[in-house]
Amino acid sequence: MTPPSDKALVPFVSVENMMRLVNAMGAETVLRELASYIEADFKRWPEFDKTPRVASHSTDGVIELMPTADAENYGFKYVNGHPKNMKEGYQTVTAFGVLSSVANGYPILLSEMTVLTALRTAATSALVAKYLAPKGAKTMAMIGNGAQCEFQALAFKAICGITTVRLYDIDPAATAKAARNLAGTGLTVVACKTGEEAIEGAEVITTCTADKQYATILTDNMVGAGVHINAIGGDCPGKTELHRDILLRSDIFVEYPPQTRIEGEIQALDADHPVTELWQVMRGQAEGRRDPRQITLFDSVGFAIEDFSALRYIAEKVKGTEFFDMLDMLADPDDPRDLFGMLQRAG
Ligand SMILES: NC(=O)c1ccc[n+]([C@@H]2O[C@H](COP(=O)([O-])OP(=O)(O)OC[C@H]3O[C@@H](n4cnc5c(N)ncnc54)[C@H](O)[C@@H]3O)[C@@H](O)[C@H]2O)c1
């Protein structure tokens, strides 16, 4: 059989190659560079096609497609969220994605996105905190010490100057795992026995738990004036982390309101409760933190443009490296109309 032509081949970044790339560059460098790609795309927000993600819910989880496009590229991510997976030895969140050329619709990159989602979520959180966290914040409470945890901690170190993370998880084994992985990163790591202990002295509180219910990871009395809350784990209808009273005391910042109103912490509020769009803060069109006593809340759900930025970044970074394979993914008959003939001749 004749080998596939160049037009048939699409660069593919496997999990192994993603890990080789990140380890070759250093995770903190990747997080910083990724955050700058995400920031650049947030600053040109009106140029993108936007839609709330397309979610298929079931008893135990959700499977979602997250598309967006600008004038040059189209991107989408396939991602699941199944909190019970972890106990059965599977990831809670796993993903892959595609970046294509708008000009002819051909994919230009296929990539694993499980590792990349953890990186892009952390880079987005830290980028947002750069605008919202109290000036000079050094300590972050990290509640939920699962797959996303260390990425969040490192991003806040690399991008916001956090020096201490205070870890808490209902499962002490998760905290021990995170503490082990973060040893030697330069962060001071404090393992805590309760959520209350974790938030002691923290200027930033990250909640990153997985539970398919209206959970109360933070109660109102736990949140003092002036903190920034980075709420990651409430990202589905019926799956939230914060007591409603915290929302009522906070200034709330979101990615894309039509999606966040369905999936975020703000599903507990009236549909017209005021929120600020982050792209407007990044463009200087809306205020971020204005007062040292203000509670700021990033109601993170994860939006398609962040994945688009991540795919755009990886497509650039793997160019000229060995960190990808070429996949025979697109049929390329000699005559574009002779698809059937190509099949026949291969028999
Ligand atoms: N906003 C986004 O962009 C985004 C992106 C990725 C993941 N997520 C969400 O982040 C969350 C964490 O993802 P993950 O991959 O780290 O999941 P994971 O299953 O690996 O870890 C979740 C951890 O939360 C802990 N936990 C559960 N309930 C708790 C509680 N009441 N108090 C303290 N800890 C508790 C579990 O023991 C576990 O260690 C999930 O809900 C996921 O859907 C959001």
Image (cartoon, helix red, strand yellow):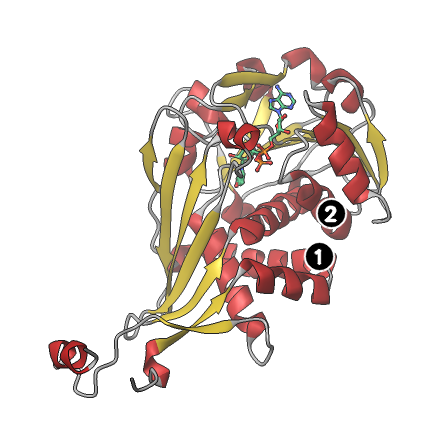
Residue under numbered circle 2 = 154
Question: In the rendering, at what x and y percent does residue 154 appear?
Answer: 73, 47
Q: Is residue 116 left or right of residue 138?
A: left
| Ligand 1 quadrant in view | top right
Question: In the rendering, at what x and y percent does residue 323 appear?
Answer: 58, 71
Q: Residues within 10 Å of mark 1 (few under 14, many from 20)?
A: some
Q: Under tag 2, what secondary structure?
A: helix
Q: Nearer the viewer, residue 52 or 13?
A: 13
Q: Under tag 1, what secondary structure?
A: helix
Amino acid marked by disc 1: Ala
Instruction: Assign the N terminus to one quadrant of the image.
Output: bottom left
Residue under the image location 59 percent in, 65 percent down = 17
Q: Is residue 327 left or right of residue 103?
A: right
Q: Is residue 7 visible?
A: yes
Q: Which residue is the extreme one toward the front? A: 347
Which mark, residue 27?
1
Residue under the image location 81 percent in, 22 percent down = 200
How many marks do you count on the picture? Answer: 2
Q: Which residue is the extreme one toward the top? A: 221
Q: Quadrant of residue 173?
A: top right
**Considering only order in the chain, which callout, 1 or 2, is on the residue closer to the N terminus?**
1
Q: Is residue 275 left or right of residue 100?
A: right
